[in-house]
Image: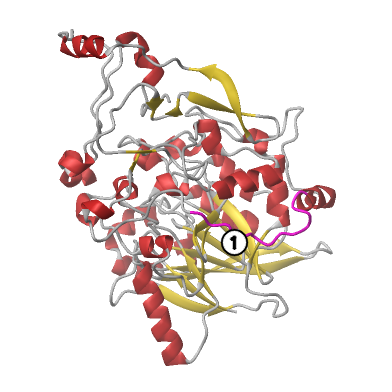
Amino acid sequence: MKIAVEGCAHGELERIYDTLALLEQKENVKIDLLLCCGDFQAVRNQDDLNCLAVPQKYREMGTFHKYYSGEKEAPILTIFIGGNHEASNYLQEMPYGGWAAPNIYYLGYAGCVNVAGIRIAGLSGIYKGRDFMKGHYEKPPYSEDTKRSVYHIRNLDVFRLKQLQQPIDIFLSHDWPRGVYHFGDVDKLLRAKPFFKEEVLTNSLGSAPSQELLSVLKPKFWFAAHLHVKFPAIVTHTVTDEEGDKQVGVTKFLALDKCLPRRHFLQVVDIPHNSEQPIKLSYDPEWLAILLLTNHLLSVKATTQYMPGPGGTDRYIFNPTAEEIDAAKARFEDDLLIPLNFEQTVPPHDPTGHPASRPPRYSIGPNVNPQTTTFCESLGIDDPMVLIGGVRGVGSPFIAKPRGDDEEETGEETDDGPSSLWSISTSGTPSRSSLVLPSPKLTEDEQEQEMEKPKEPSKETFEPPRITEDEEDSSAQNMNESSIPSVKRFKRRNYNLYQCGSEDD
C-alpha cells in the first residue's frame, strides 16, 4: 500500500491533495492513504476560526470547509491527529475519533484503527507537564488559557495506548518523542535549527510521554511533525519474541515540515498490506476492549487524576484478554467496519459573505456529535462532552440551538447548554434530569427598571484574559463588531449558576 505522510497541514488541505494528484500523474502511481501528523486545522466556519490558538496574522479559514460542506470530496482516504493549532471545539466532539468530513477521519485524543491489515495508532496534541495529570475538562467557549490547554495530552490517553500488546505498524504523533534525535544526524538537525542546541544538549527536546510510548509500543514506523523540519532516524529496540528469545528491532522515525512551497512536508512510503481486504477503516478490537476496560478512569475535572498502579487492590494492568476482546467485538456484532456516518453539526463557512446567504448564528458551546453518541452507546462507554455538558438543539437533535442576530440573550440558556440539564445513565446514553433551572419572571417594565438601576461595584468580577507574548499582536482579534459576543446580565444571586469559562468549571 502506498501511503503519503504529511507534516503540519495548517489548513492547506486543498494544496496537499493537489500535490498528491501531481505526484500520481508524474510517477504513474496510486496513493491509497494519506496520514497527517497534526495542525490539521479542521475549520468549518468563523466560530471555529475564533477557537484556533494561533496569532492573528496566521488566522486563515483554510480549505477544509470545502470538504466539510460537500463542495469538494477528499480524493484519498485521510487519517489525521490533532496538534497545537486546531479548531479544538470541533475535535472535542469526537474524543474517540470520527469522520471530520467524508473520507477524512480524525483519530481522537488517542486511537487505533485498522486499514487493510495495517494497524495505525496515534496520539493528538502536545505535551505540557502542568496539564498532563488533569482530566479533559476544557469546553467552549474557551478562555485564552483553555484555548491552549485543550490540546495538551493527558495521562489517561497515554496510559490507554500503553495497554496495547499486539504489534503496531504505524504510530502518529505531533511532537517528537524526546531523545529520538540521538538516533539520527543530530548535527544536520542543528544546522537547520540551531536554536534546538540547548534542548538537545539537555535532552529536553520533545515529549517524555511519547518517548515512553516509543519504548513500550516499538512500532515499525513513527511519523511526527511540529518542529517544521524533516528529520529521519532509526531507533533500535530489544524485542522479545513469542519463544522468549531477544532480538533487535527497529522503528523508522520520520518528522516532516509544514505545507509550504519548497519545504519537505510530504513523503510517500510503501508498506505491505493485506491485498484481500478493501482499503477501508475498521475499529481495532484490542483498542475497543481497552476503552471499555478503562472507561471508569475518564475524568472531566481540572484536578490531578492518577492512573492505577501496583500496591492497591484494584486492577492496574488493562492488557485485554482474548475473552475481553471478544466481548468488545460482540458489542458491535463482530462488524468492526467504521460506519460512514458523517453528519454536519454546524453550518459550513459561506465564502460569499452575503448577509442573505449567511446561516443562523450558532452559540459556541459544548456540542455532542451523533457519531460519538452512536459509538459510545454501542461500546457502553461515556462521552466526555456529555459529561462536561453537551447541548441538544433543533434540526438535528445534537446541533447547538441557532439564534437570530436580533434574538435577546436570557438566563434560560447558558454557555453550559439549555436550562434543561442532561445526565448520564448507566448505559452511557443521555437521559433527562429532573433538575430544571427556573426562568426569571419579570415584566417588561421590571426588566427596564432593573437595567436602569445603578450598579454597585461587585467583588465577583471576571479576571481579564492573560495574553501570552506570542498573542500580543493578535489580542485585538475580538474587537470587530461581528466577533463581540452579546453580554448576559444576571442578578448577583444567580452569578455562580451561570458563570463559565473559568479554570474551575
Find out whether residue 423 is within the magenta segment: no
- Within 10 Å of disc 1 (Cα), the crowding (few <14, some 14-19, many 20+) is few
Q: Position of residue 198 (x, y in %)?
A: 33, 53
Image: 283 above or below 145: below
* Residue 471 falls left or right of residue 159: left
Image: 450 above or below 306: above
Q: Nearer the viewer, residue 186 or 443?
A: 443
Q: Amino acid at mark 1?
A: Leu
What span is in magenta?
A: 331-343
For the stretch drawn in magenta, the main secondary structure is loop
Residue positioned 28% across, 51% down in the render: 358
* Residue 405 falls left or right of residue 431: left
Give the image quarter of residue 305: top right
Q: Nearer the viewer, residue 21 or 112?
A: 21
Give the image quarter of residue 8: bottom left
Q: Which quarter shows the C terminus?
A: top left
Colouring: secondary structure
Q: Secondary structure at mark 1?
A: loop
Q: Position of residue 442 (x, y in %)?
A: 31, 11
For disc 1, the marked residue is: 340
